Image (tube, grey):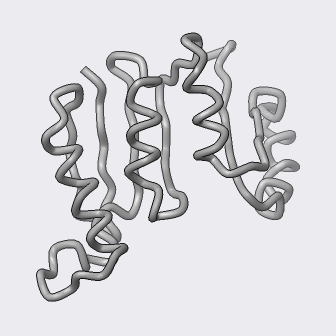
């Protein structure tokens, strides 16, 4: 939409700086609020504001914090809003019972949390590393 905004967080300015000329060329640079800061910290600062509402969020970040991202974003997601979480099958290892490292266990716990959360409906897509689509009721 004309009044739409995109919030992007990255801990390193390298990739966003590469993207900036493309954002400008596309005429959307003024719509992008780029924060060079850990996303968890920035989302925590937003969670205190009742005006922070997202229509959509996409998480492809530090894997150990995926449950934290989920816990922070769901309350800020508008009803009907979408949260997309990438890598939720982690190279197929999540479904392999013989693999039980911390990363895999974190994703198993996240997937269970999402599956039992009455606030959302979800679909885990078994494509590549897995992608979970979550809609807030």
Observer-nearest of 53 and 29? 53
Q: As displayed, is residue 5 above or below residue 38?
A: above
| Depth order, front residue of 70/4 | 70
Q: Position of residue 106 (x, y in %)?
A: 32, 64
Q: Is residue 77 above or below residue 105?
A: above
Residue found farthest to the bottom: 98
Q: Residue at x 33, y 72 (%)?
A: 90
In the image, residue 29 above or below residue 14: above
Of residue 37 and residue 58, the one placed in the foreground of this image is 37
Number of residue marks: 0
Q: Position of residue 69 (x, y in %)?
A: 46, 45
Quadrant of the frame with the N terminus: top right
Q: Does 37 sit left or right of 79 as displayed?
A: right
Task: Give x and y (percent) for residue 14.
Answer: 82, 64
User: Residue placed at 58% from the left, 46% from the top?
Assistant: 40
Residue sitting at 30 percent across and 50 percent down? 132
| Quarter that holds the C terminus | top left
Nearest the viewer among 128 and 78 is 78
Left or right of 97 on screen, residue 16: right
Name which quarter of the figure residue 84 lies in.
top left
* Image position of 65 (left or right of 48): left
């Amino acid at each position: 939409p004309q009044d739409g905004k995109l919030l992007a967080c990255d801990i390193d300015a390298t990739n966003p700086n590469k993207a900036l000329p493309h954002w400008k060329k596309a005429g959307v640079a003024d719509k992008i609020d780029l924060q060079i800061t850990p996303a968890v910290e920035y989302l925590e600062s937003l969670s205190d504001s009742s005006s922070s509402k997202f229509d959509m969020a996409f998480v492809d970040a530090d894997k150990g914090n995926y449950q934290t991202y989920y816990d922070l974003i769901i309350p800020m997601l508008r009803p009907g809003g979408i949260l997309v979480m990438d890598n939720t099958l982690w190279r197929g290892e999540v479904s392999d019972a013989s693999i039980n490292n911390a990363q895999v266990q974190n994703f198993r716990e996240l997937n269970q949390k999402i599956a039992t959360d009455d606030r959302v409906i979800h679909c885990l897509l078994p494509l590549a590393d897995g992608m979970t689509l979550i809609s807030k009721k």
